[in-house]
Image (spheres, rainbow, N blue to C red):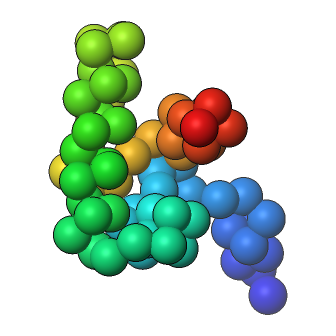
Amino acid sequence: GKNMSNTVSQPMYVDVAEVCRDWGCSRAKGYSIIKQLSEQMKAEDPRLLTMSGKINRIYYEEVCMRR
């Protein structure tokens, strides 16, 4: 198909479903993790864009590596 590229590249944001999969937690817990990470990310770099219910993938993966 002509839409091959999205299968290769991941979206720029991680949503709650993915957080729940990675951390083995409930959606409620997933949202609280996202909220926490968003606040942390904003504190580290106020220019970064935060989205409700999603977290920047690059930042998220960095945090997952650290834990």
Question: As drawn, is 48 to the left or to the right of 3?
Answer: left
Question: As drawn, is 15 to the left or to the right of 64?
Answer: left
Task: Residue 24 in the image: state x and y as whole percent.
Answer: 49, 73
Q: Is residue 19 positioned above or below 51 on the image?
A: below
Quadrant into which the N terminus falls: bottom right
Quadrant into which the C terminus falls: top right
Task: Residue 58 in the image: state x and y as whole percent.
Answer: 59, 36
Question: As drawn, is 33 to the left or to the right of 17?
Answer: left
Residue 18 seen: no
Residue 35 seen: yes
Task: Residue 4 in the image: state x and y as whole percent.
Answer: 78, 75
Q: How many marks?
A: 0
Q: Residue at x 46, y 51 (%)?
A: 13
Q: Residue at x 40, y 72 (%)?
A: 25
Q: Residue at x 67, y 38 (%)?
A: 65
Q: Is residue 3 positioned above or below 18 on the image?
A: below
Question: As drawn, is 25 to the left or to the right of 23?
Answer: left
Quadrant position of residue 8: bottom right
Q: Is residue 32 positioned above or below 44 on the image?
A: below
Q: Going by the picture, which residue comes out furthest to the bottom? A: 1
Quadrant position of residue 53: bottom left
Q: Residue at x 32, y 25 (%)?
A: 40
Task: Residue 9 in the image: state x and y as whole percent.
Answer: 72, 58
